[in-house]
Amino acid sequence: MNLLLKNATYINWNTLEFSVRNILITQEKTSLDFPEVVTKTSLPPDTEIIDCSGKLVTKSFAVGHHHAYSALAMGMPAPEKSPQNFHEILQYVWWRLDKCLDAGIIESSALVTAMACLKAGSTFIIDHHASPMAVKGSLEIIAKAFEKVGVSHLLCYEVSDRDGEKIARQGIDETERYLRHHQGLVGLHASFTVSDKTMRQAVALTKIHNTGIHIHVAEDGYDQERCLREHGQRVIGRLSKSGVLNSPKTILVHCLHLDDNERELLRSSPVWVAQNSESNLNNNVGHFRSAGLGNNLMLGTDGMHSDMLRSAKAAFLTGQQSDNITSESAYRRFRNVHRYLSENNFEGDGENNLVVLDYASPTPVTCENFSAHFIYGLTAEHVTHVISNGKLVVRNRKILTVNEEEILEESRRQAARLWDRMAL
């Protein structure tokens, strides 16, 4: 079915130019030049009309780094031993959780993540997955779940040697199988859990499938300490020597504990950096600094939630102490994920992905002050309708593609299973 957004206040996501217009959307394209006067004869057959008078319409959002596998962690019991540092947080919480995932839990996690993303305005997810005891077929499960809900994606499996060489090899094999039929990335956990052999295999896969690496980098000082001790160099130097920095499709996540030489290496490379401020706060690992990193910066949620507007606010507010960031540059980082996807020819983030915002501001909203409204006014609660790849997937804040209540009921059952498994 075609869709006409009538009398919409359209905001060009790139230039922030405002215009009132009728927008005709099909699965093939979006027409911003539809005539002001709408008649039955001027509309294609099977066109639904949504009156957007007084509402803002703009390109939908995208998540630059997510962990759908963590979706059922909210409210779970605390670990028996309280973590004292970042490495122990990984050991006692996340590595314990990911070993307990199975196909049912992975599917529920992906479904609820996709629904949460859509309701917060995001129609594209770049996800980083780990399930070391259920590796085979895990990416296909996530892809099908995302597509069932109506979300486009760029997936990878988090390959790591932390559970032994056999499971690392399974991660490489899962990646290779998936990339034969889907766009995706080659995932690695972090330098300190990846052997030289696995690093070489991962980089070789990127060349075979013309893609990039998706890896956590210097999230905590521990990553650098281990790299210096075991490889005699800092993390970015190791990645550069391994060929990780050669591809514009590569995403380096976090990048907190870098020295000036590492920042220069990144700035002179084509890679992208994904900032995740709330996760950094939650793990007490430090604050992001953009100094010396260049312009290839985008934002993610790191599995903390699925709300990119919230992530942008966090990047801006935490940056007041640690970073050179303004409301304008926060908005640019928020939108840079579209540039990453477009420049690398990834599919699913075209102009027929739109969000309708019911934002009744008490003050004027203009091109000149939009970035301030973006930081201080707009929230996910203002997301009313969402169009993904030309299809209306959220109407009046209600998911149209799946039964939300049934999925949430099942996810609660799967969460209880997960928590029980973690307690064993």
Image (spheres, grey):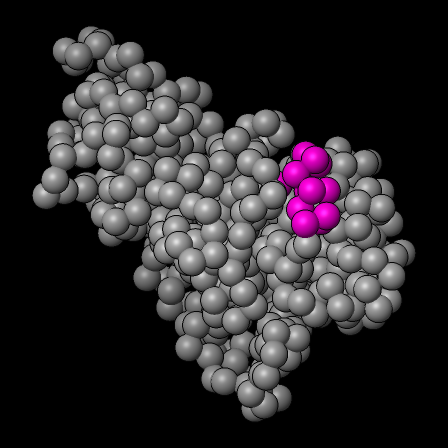
384 part of magenta stretch: no
Residue at the bottom extreme, as displayed? 80
Q: Considering depth in this image, is 31 or 398 the residue closer to the camera?
A: 31
Secondary structure mostly seen in the magenta stretch: helix
Specify start and end residues of the magenta stretch as a single range: 260-272
Q: Position of residue 191 (x, y in %)?
A: 76, 60
Q: Would residue 150 appear left or right of 262 to someone viewing this image?
A: left
Q: Quadrant of residue 226?
A: bottom right
Q: Residue at x 82, y 64 (%)?
A: 228
Magenta region includes residue 268: yes
Instruction: Please provide percent x and percent y for residue 6.
Output: 19, 24
Q: Residue at x 84, y 47 (%)?
A: 242
Is residue 17 visible in the rendered image? The answer is yes
* Residue 186, visible in the rendered structure: no
Snapshot quadrant of residue 154: top right
Residue at far right of view: 197
Q: Is residue 225 left or right of residue 33?
A: right
Please give left or right for residue 87 compared with residue 126 in the image: right
Residue at the (27%, 42%) spot, across then down: 372
- The front one of 275 and 175 is 275
Task: Identify the residue at the far left of this view.
Answer: 362
